[in-house]
Image (cartoon, rainbow, N blue to C red):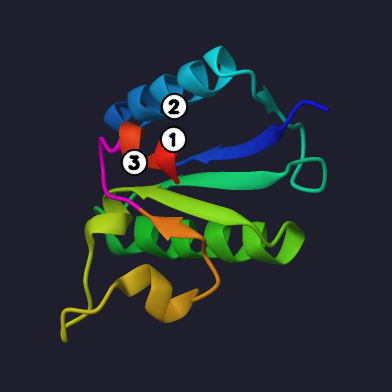
Amino acid sequence: MVAKVGFVSLGCPKALVDSELILTQLSAEGYETAKDYAGADLVIVNTCGFIDSAVEESLSAIGEALTENGKVIVTGCLGAKKNADGSDLITSIHPKVLAVTGPHATAEVLQA
């Protein structure tokens, strides 16, 4: 049985390039892309953290992926954001994510 990955890419063209790199590497390693969350073994959400509306959209997408699938890895700019106390923003809101990486962290995503 081939492992399937759901993927959500949000943000700027640089994030899209990261998404394409991750998907290309996953494909080379034998993974397939699922058409929906239910058909995925896990979901990767590539986030944007540049402006407030993008942060809200990213957090919403993470929440939706967790609700629909339950196994979520988060990458992208929002992954680098911290709360005022220095704690991770994403895991403080969505503690059930499997892993959080920052922008351009394609290798870390593949290891997660």
Q: Are marks 2 and 3 in contact (CB under 8 Å)?
A: no
Please state the horizontal and vertical placement of residue 8, each as a whole percent of the image. 55, 41
Q: Which mark is residue 22?
A: 2
Residue in the image at 21% along x and 71% along y:
82
**Residue kind at label 1, given as amino acid type:** Leu
Q: CA distance from mark 2 to mark 3?
A: 10 Å
> Does residue 7 lie above or below 33 as drawn?
below
For the N terminus, the image quarter is: top right
Residue in the image at 16% along x and 86% along y:
85
Magenta stretch: give its range. 101-105
Q: CA distance from mark 2 to mark 1?
A: 7 Å
**Residue kind at label 2, given as amino acid type:** Ile
Please state the horizontal and vertical placement of residue 76, each as a whole percent of the image. 33, 46
Residue 54 is one of the magenta-drawn residues: no
In the image, is 16 to the left or to the right of 37? left
Q: Earlier in the sequence, mark 2 or mark 3?
A: 2
In the image, is 96 to the left or to the right of 58? right
The quadrant where residue 72 appears: bottom right
> Does residue 50 lie above or below 110 as drawn?
below
Q: Which residue is mark 3?
A: 108
Q: Earlier in the sequence, mark 2 or mark 1?
A: 2
Q: Are marks 3 and 1 in contact (CB under 8 Å)?
A: yes
**Residue kind at label 3, given as amino acid type:** Glu
Please state the horizontal and vertical placement of residue 62, each as a whole percent of the image. 54, 60
Q: Which residue is mark 1?
A: 110
Neighbor class of circle 2 (other Cα within 10 Å; few <14, some 14-19, many 20+) is: many
- Per the picture, the main secondary structure of the magenta-coloured stretch is loop
Q: CA distance from mark 3 to mark 1?
A: 5 Å
Residue in the image at 50% along x and 47% along y:
45
* Residue at disc 3, secondary structure: helix
Residue in the image at 53% along x and 23% along y:
26
